[in-house]
Image (spheres, helix red, strand yellow):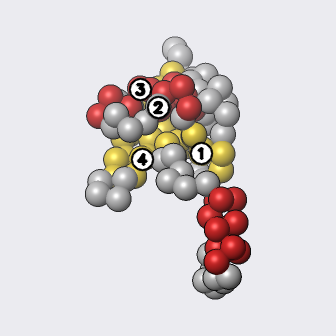
Amino acid sequence: MTERLNVEVAYARPDRQWLVALNLPEGATVQGAALASGILEVCPELDRSALKLGVFGKAAKPDAPLREGDRVEIYRPLLADPKEVRRQRAESGKRMKKGG
């Protein structure tokens, strides 16, 4: 009998969050879970070819194998380049707020 893994896939937008529980075959990958979740079909802003994925808050490669109980996270694309934002702040003489 083939072993199965219980995992979750999470994605959040400012207006809505998804948490999908999946039961996948052993050997399933991070990308496989993201695709199986169905989230990519209902969120057109996500580009399949440039997905940023992680497991429990740590970046993960798409082909990384999953373990029982893992939570795969689909990350939103950045709205602004952090380096560019820092450069613009420096030019205008503004200081960053404490804590980010």
Q: Position of residue 12 (x, y in %)?
A: 39, 52
* Tag of residue 36: 3
Give yes or no for contact between labels 4 and 3 (Cβ–Cβ under 8 Å): no
**What crowding class fits label 2: few (fewer than 14 Cα within 10 Å), some (14-19), or many (20 or more)?**
few
- The residue labelled by disc 4 is 11
Element type where label 2 sits in the image: loop
- Three-letter code, disc 2: Asp
Regarding mark 1 in the picture, which secondary structure is present there?
strand
Q: Label 1 vs label 3: CA separation?
A: 16 Å
| Residue at 35 percent of width and 59 percent of height | 14
| Separation (CA) of disc 1 from disc 2 | 19 Å
Looking at the image, can residue 68 be seen? Answer: no
Q: Which residue is mark 1?
A: 55
Residue carrying label 2: 47
Q: CA distance from mark 4 to mark 3?
A: 13 Å
Relative side of 39 to 93, left or right: left
Determine which of the numbered discs, if any, sits on residue 96 in the image: none
The residue carrying pointer 3 sits among few (fewer than 14), some (14 to 19) or many (20 or more) residues within 10 Å by Cα, namely some
> Could you classify mark 1 by the number of other residues whose Cα lies within 10 Å: few (under 14), some (14-19), or many (20 or more)?
some
Name the residue located 29 percent from the left edge and 57 percent from the top edge.
Answer: 15
Ranked by sequence position, the earlier of labels 2 and 3 is 3
Amino acid identity at mark 4:
Tyr
Q: Are marks 4 and 2 in contact (CB under 8 Å)?
A: no
Type of amino acid under label 1: Val
* In front of the other: 98 or 68: 98
Camera sees residue 34: yes
Q: Upstream in the sequence, badge 1 or badge 4?
A: 4
Toward the top, the furthest residue is 1
Q: Secondary structure at mark 4?
A: strand
Where residue 9 appears, as percent x and y from the top left, is 45, 41
